[in-house]
Image (spheres, coloured by chain):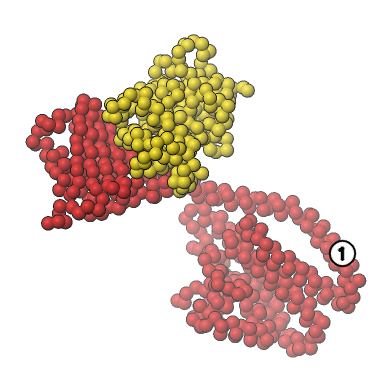
Amino acid sequence: MSVPDSANLTGPPTEAAAAIRVVIVDDHAIFRSGLKADLDADIQVVAEASTVEEAVAAVTAQAPDVVLLDVHLPGGRGQGGREVVAGCTAQLGHTKFLALSVSDAAEDVVSVIRAGARGYVTKSISGAEISDAVRRVAGGDAVFSPRLAGFVLDAFGTSEVAVEDELDKLSVRELEVMRLIARGYSYKEVAKALFISIKTVETHVSAVLRKLQLSSRHELTRWAAERRLL
Amino acid sequence: MSPKMYRSTDRRVAGVCAGLAEHLGLRVGLVRAIMAASCFVFGAGVVFYAWLWILVPLEGEEQSLGTPLLDADGTPYLKLFRPAPESSFIANSDTREATATQAGRSLGIREIMVGAVLVVAAFALFSGPLIRTVNVGTLIPITVIGIGAVLAWMQLDATRRAGLLNAANIGTPLAIVRFSAGIGLVIAGVLIAVSGSGSWSLAWSSAMASLAVLAGVGLVLAPWALKFWRDFQKERTGRIRQTERAEIAAHLHDSVLQTLALIQKRADSPQDVTRLARAQERELREWIYHDADETSGALVARIKSVCAEIEDLHGLAVEVVAVGDAELTEQRQPLVQATREAVLNGVRHGGTTVSVYVEAGVKGVEVFVRDRGSGFDVESMPADRLGVRESVVGRMQRNGGTAGIMSSSEGTEVRLYLPIGEPTMEDMK
């Protein structure tokens, strides 16, 4: 498959062995170049794309570690970021998607997560924060913004349940973690507040992400239907 | 002046009688009876009915179609043959122009129709004595043609009502049945009238001939009709899009462009620029994601608006994340005020982005306000810091809630909690 014109290649991936290879997908060239400049040195942008088709082609050709994916994209069937994730299902084992948007509407956030993205951040976050998020997603963890944590709590309900490890409910610990993230705590601060390790926080967050993606819980379905997510 | 007459949507045939009854203030049954009775006076009722049907718009139909009015005494007066009043056609925007030309076009058809009806009426009146001598053999085909035409016309009327040939309407089975029944009756009537003799072999061959002619004409006209239809559809979608675009453009002009102009003026003051940009962002978000927020009840909406106010005042972002919602009762007003104080403190002393988390559950409402400032020592909080001690902690305690402050070098967090349904101290006094 040929790589479209706007998917600029920036050298072979062997240049820096430890570097995280990233594809930036966003329809605004100004934002792409700004983001590229903001990212830390160990994150290497291997391609850029501005439409759904270009994004699918670039991701397939480059097999990057992380795709920074705008939720709203032109092209395709008009489904934006969700469609890119759906078009790259063969890559999902290796490539992780991090959704990036100015929109904080529930339908945008949750739909792209349910499509398979590993995290969601708003475009207003700083370069250091986004680099951190990229590293975390590349390492297999999930990245939750306070607002996404709020949506999760809204969808799963905040009343505590005794049953652990059930797909349709959040465990007490997961609820606590989500609450702290919604309050604006970083993972490190969550770990400190709950007297657990950062690794444990990450495990909880990943579990919540999995539940959010896979749960067909009645309330979640209703919640999604109310917001026209299904 | 008497109210304008409309055909009623609650109708038997075309809503003429119901509309007339409403207009004249009479009972529908009476008007229908008079109408039916007058049909036997040289068919005057039929002619009058058809005339009103053509000229009187259906309730809620476009008004600019130069429609005639009825005087208070019920005698209709016609202002159709006069050029339509300019004011009703010339509108101040471009979008109205299309409507105006359309109205003008249908006016032409209308005039022809009215002319034809009047000719028929005149003929009917003058040849009144003749009608009695007409034999049944010609009366039947004419009646059949008439009924067929009425059926087909009902179809046309229905489509006109649905905003000029609504594609969905044509597809309804009833409309198709009505239309084809009308066509069939007209053809049958014409055939009987033309053949006259009633001989079936003759009727059959003439039916084949007329079908062949119709098919030929249809074949010739089909591409033209298709093109016309496509153009019409294109124009319609274009107009809808144009209207939408105009609305969005108007909104962007009123909000975003104005703000951008202001930002350029205040470019030397970063705080003003941030403040303006934040306010605009908030406003635009509200406009775009309006329905997503519709479920929010009063409490969250109030807290959000309070935070927005502080954002505007201080030019620092206040992010509100809300889970659940609650009614904004009298008891919860102090919670909102305490939240406001806490956010103000965070913005003033923290000097950073402030996160607000509201959780309204079954047990109570919890609010967390967190800033990323350098923090302060809660124990040695100076007595003059009335803001926190009095308006946050004190206020919450007086109203049956609790407030806690945690501060470290990484920021300060204020926790407010108000249980649900518990009587406040004030209530008990």
Residue drawn at (31%, 43%), measured in percent from left and top?
B359
Where is residue B207? Give x, y as percent.
85, 67
Circle 1: residue type: Ala
Asked if residue A183 can be seen in this view, the reply is: yes
Where is residue A99? Give x, y as percent.
45, 31
Q: Is residue B347 left or right of residue A206?
A: left
Residue drawn at (59%, 82%), measured in percent from left and top?
B32
Where is residue B288? Give x, y as percent.
42, 44
Viewer-proximal residue among B138 and A96: A96
Viewer-proximal residue among A97 and A28: A97
Residue tagged 1: B209
Viewer-proximal residue among B273 and B111: B273
Asked if residue A29 can be seen in this view, the reply is: no
In this rendering, the answer to whether A138 lies above or below A112 is above
Q: How many marks?
A: 1
Q: Find numbered disc 1 in the image and state the secondary structure of the residue it sits on.
A: helix
Q: Is residue A57 left or right of residue B222?
A: left
Q: In which quarter of the image is residue B275?
A: top left
State the quadrant of the N terminus of chain B.
bottom left
Q: Is residue A54 left or right of residue A147?
A: right
Residue drawn at (44%, 21%), measured in percent from left and top?
A139
Of all chains in the rendering, the one displayed in yellow is: A
Chain B appears what colour?
Answer: red
In this rendering, the answer to whether B385 lies above or below B93 is above
Question: Please, which residue is most extreme toward the left here?
Answer: B383
Viewer-proximal residue among A92 and B247: A92
State the quadrant of the C terminus of chain B.
bottom left
Q: Quadrant of residue A212?
A: top left
Residue drawn at (55%, 33%), measured in percent from left and top?
A86
